Amino acid sequence: MPGKNLDPSSSPRALLGAELRVARERAGKSQAELGEPLFVSGSFIGQLEAGTRRMHIEFARQIDEILHTDGFFARNCGALAKSKYPNHFAEAAEAEAEAKTIREYAPLALPGMLQPEAYARAVFLAYQPTATEEVIAELVANRLARAALLSDPTTPLFWCVLDEAVLRRTVGSRAVMAEAMCHIAALIRTRRIFVQVLPFSAGAHSSMGGTLKMMTFEDAPPLAYVQGNAIGVLLDDPATVTRHSLTYDLLTASALSPIQSLAMIESAAEDYAHDEHV
């Protein structure tokens, strides 16, 4: 039976997931058998064990009761409840940090991981026009910290489809947009990310409903994340994830090629820079 509390400084989700796997196997239960009384799938239990999903207190208490772990999981899941991200995005951000591949469709703004500082600041000021400077600065810092995932030269593999609206809507200023477009182009040219632009000429497409993020993992089932205005849902149902994966595949089929997309992005950067100096 687990005993000592976990050290929250040493990847608590991964540690708690490893302890869950040990406790479950000691109890002789499969992932599906543990998930049944919790009304979740075996895949969800696997994601808890792999550290790609956060264990919430209500699950922790039930797990302690089912596995006879004397309150261990309820005591330790408190470390997982603290997040620097909004509630609707916190779990997706944590999964993002563990992902092997990330595929994202952005219909209105650059994906958070690709936003330079000035662009991110303009976005947050638009979202929260009455926020204090301290709040905006913290939001921007947290968003830039996510971009650190791209400091690794290979992992995660990041592929995004940008709606042409992302290139055409001026966020902040023409100078901010010029910087943002150059930033994206530089990431593409260093072969760190793959980007396709979905042009207006493509017309109706498979993700008219909004943003979509697909994530795969080394040792856990894939996840899909859909987001609206201050709301987001992380999905793990295999059939639903498969359907969203097809949606993303159809987006890439409708989008410009990576080479054509880079040309459009660099052209937009030149236009913004030129307009700024006129």
Image (cartoon, rainbow, N blue to C red):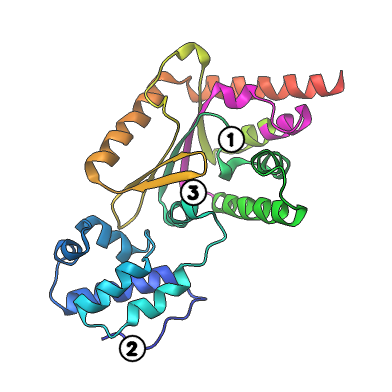
Dot 1 falls on a residue whose secondary structure is loop
The circle drawn on residue 154 is: 3
- Closest to the camera, between mark 3 and mark 2, is 2
Q: Residue at x 35, y 53 (%)?
A: 217
**Residue 59 placement: quadrant:** bottom left
Q: How many marks?
A: 3
- Residue occupied by mark 2: 3
Q: Residue at x 58, y 35 (%)?
A: 110
- Return the disc, 2 or 1, that comes first in the chain's sequence: 2
What percent of the width, then of the height, locates residue 223? 34, 47
- Residue occupied by mark 1: 110
- For the N terminus, the quadrant is bottom left
The amino acid type found where label 2 is placed reads Gly
Q: Residue at x 68, y 38 (%)?
A: 126
Q: Which residues are magenta?
A: 152-180
Determine if the magenta segment contains residue 261.
no
One can see residue 11 in this view: no
What percent of the width, then of the height, locates residue 135? 70, 55
Q: Residue at x 40, y 25 (%)?
A: 251
